[in-house]
């Protein structure tokens, strides 16, 4: 009668059938572990590669520094190129200043350069002389050298003068001279347009005259020029100009009355 060989291993174990016999699994594992321990013990471990690791780390650090330095240098060069190199774009055009509009006409009434004085008012005109305009008659005025009393007497004498002394659009010319005081040129103007300026040319010089008139629109006035201590010139020219520079009247007198 044939029989069956059976074996019972340790709890949780099993059986391995080898060469007709059964070897417990736990014993096999123990033998393998022991063999591995013997092999491991036969191996000799060398020293750790510290120097190689340090060299590799330094090499990689140098590589990173070179990369960062190169990038920084490139950035600096780019900034310098932007500042120093001329731009390829043309400079922006500067707009021309807007022209001021031309005035279309006078902005207001013109200011008269003729001084307005009251009738018989004594006006100092230099060299100690007093000038007075009278409403009696036309183009009636006096020049007095002897002070206020002489002025009042001259005015009283001139009150009886009536009528016009010069024609329309005309000028008159006279002078007063004293070796001690100098020379004054005086005269009257009668123009449709009030003069903007009057000049007197005498002894090789052209002088600007001062002008006075009575209130309102009398249509006439008086001019006067202080010629200093120069001797009176027997050849004098008087010219009256309008506001636009046109000549309103001119008198070329070769021998001004004394």
Image: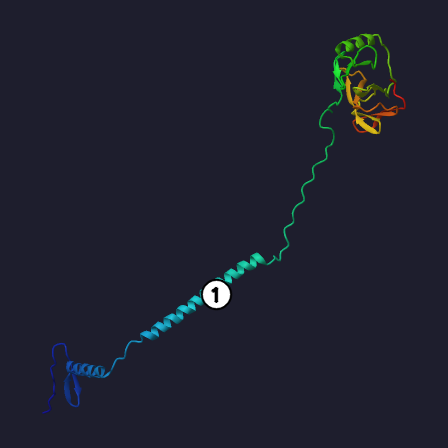
Up the image or down, 229 lies above or below 20; here it is above
Does 214 sit left or right of 164 as displayed?
A: left
Up the image or down, 257 lies above or below 8; here it is above
- Residue 183 in the image: state x and y as whole percent: 81, 21
- Disc 1, SS: helix
* Quadrant of res 16: bottom left
- Residue 83 in the image: state x and y as whole percent: 56, 56
- For label 1, the crowd category at 10 Å Cα-Cα, with few meaning under 14, some 14 to 19 and many 20 or more, is few
Up the image or down, 134 lies above or below 34; here it is above
Q: Residue at x 82, y 29 (%)?
A: 205
Q: Residue at x 80, y 21 (%)?
A: 182
* Quadrant of res 164: top right
Camera-side residue of 219 and 178? 178
Camera-side residue of 52 and 143? 143
Camera-side residue of 103 and 142? 142
- Residue 126 in the image: state x and y as whole percent: 76, 19
Query: Mark 1 highlights which residue?
Result: 70
Does 68 sit left or right of 179 as displayed?
A: left
Camera-side residue of 196 and 134? 134
Q: Residue furthest right?
A: 254
Q: Residue at x 41, y 69 (%)?
A: 62
Does 92 sit left or right of 148 as displayed?
A: left
Image quarter of the N terminus: bottom left
Q: Residue furthest left?
A: 1
- Residue 199 in the image: state x and y as whole percent: 81, 26
């Amino acid at each position: 009668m044939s029989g069956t060989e059976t074996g019972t291993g340790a709890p949780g174990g099993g059986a391995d059938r080898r060469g007709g016999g059964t070897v417990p699994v736990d014993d096999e594992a123990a033998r393998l572990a022991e063999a591995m321990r013997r092999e491991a013990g036969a191996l000799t471990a060398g020293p750790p590669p510290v120097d190689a690791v340090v060299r590799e780390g330094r090499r990689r650090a140098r590589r990173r520094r070179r990369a960062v330095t190169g990038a920084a240098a490139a950035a600096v060069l780019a900034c310098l190129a932007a500042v120093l190199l001329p731009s390829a774009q043309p400079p922006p055009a500067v707009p021309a200043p807007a022209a001021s509009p031309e005035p279309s006409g006078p902005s207001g009434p013109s200011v008269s350069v003729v001084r307005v004085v009251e009738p018989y008012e004594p006006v100092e005109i230099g060299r100690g002389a007093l000038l007075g305009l009278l409403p009696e008659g036309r183009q009636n005025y006096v020049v007095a050298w002897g002070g206020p009393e002489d002025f009042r007497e001259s005015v009283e004498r001139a009150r009886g003068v009536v009528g016009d002394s010069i024609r329309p659009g005309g000028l008159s010319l006279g002078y007063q001279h004293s070796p001690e005081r100098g020379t004054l040129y005086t005269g009257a103007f009668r123009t449709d347009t009030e003069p903007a300026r009057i000049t007197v040319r005498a002894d090789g010089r052209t002088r600007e005259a001062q002008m006075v008139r009575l209130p309102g629109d009398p249509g006439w006035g008086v001019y006067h020029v202080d010629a200093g201590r120069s001797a009176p010139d027997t050849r004098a020219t008087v010219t009256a100009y309008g506001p636009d520079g046109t000549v309103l009247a001119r008198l070329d007198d070769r021998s001004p009355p004394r």
